[in-house]
Amino acid sequence: MQSPGREPSMEDILASIKKVIADEKDLRTAAPRDPEPTEEAHSEGSEDDVLELDKPLAPPVDLGPPLVDEGIAETSRHSLETLSTIAASVPAPPPVNPLEDMIREMLRPILKQWLDDHLPGIVDEHVKREITRITGRPL
């Protein structure tokens, strides 16, 4: 197995993949699939296994007379449907955060300068480290 501080090598990854494939192949050969259930298997089930939804689960509750007149409810429903239709047709506004945009513009030149100064050294160091790891010879 690998040490906790290092990334897995290509060999470790390939070995892991081969192990998963082998385990899956063993599982498939060890437990053959059951054949399709026959009509007899379906008819053997009891009626108690089926939940009938045509019967109410609880007795109906008397809520009393409606709180809103049917005409007023229909007018309100129509207004809300109009609002919903219009709201669905309008494109969403782009997400705007003026403070975030201002900070991003202020940091852009600082970040560019830092990357110009440090990125080549970081890339060179990592490339040399990887070449040393692959070849086994220090550069």
Image (tube, rainbow, N blue to C red):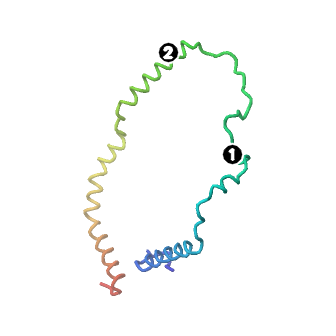
Residue occupying image coordinates x 35% and y 82%: 134
- Residues 100 and 132: in front is 132
Label 2 SS = helix
The quadrant of the picture occupied by the C terminus is: bottom left
Residue receiving disc 2? 75
**Circle number at residue 71:** none
Query: What is the three-letter code of the residue carrying label 2?
Result: Thr
Q: Give the percent coordinates (x, y) of residue 122.
A: 31, 70
Label 1 SS = loop
Residue occupying image coordinates x 52% and y 74%: 25
Residue occupying image coordinates x 70% and y 52%: 45
Quarter residue 112 falls in = bottom left
Few, some or many residues within 10 Å of mark 2 (<14, 14–19, 20+)? few
Q: Give the percent coordinates (x, y) of residue 13.
A: 44, 75
Quarter residue 102 falls in = top left
Does residue 54 sit above or below 36 in this rendering?
A: above
Mark 1 or 2, nearer chain start = 1
Does residue 41 sit above or below 14 in this rendering?
A: above
Residue receiving disc 1? 50
Query: What is the three-letter code of the residue carrying label 1?
Result: Val
Quarter residue 11 falls in = bottom left
Which residue occupies the extreme front position in the image? 40
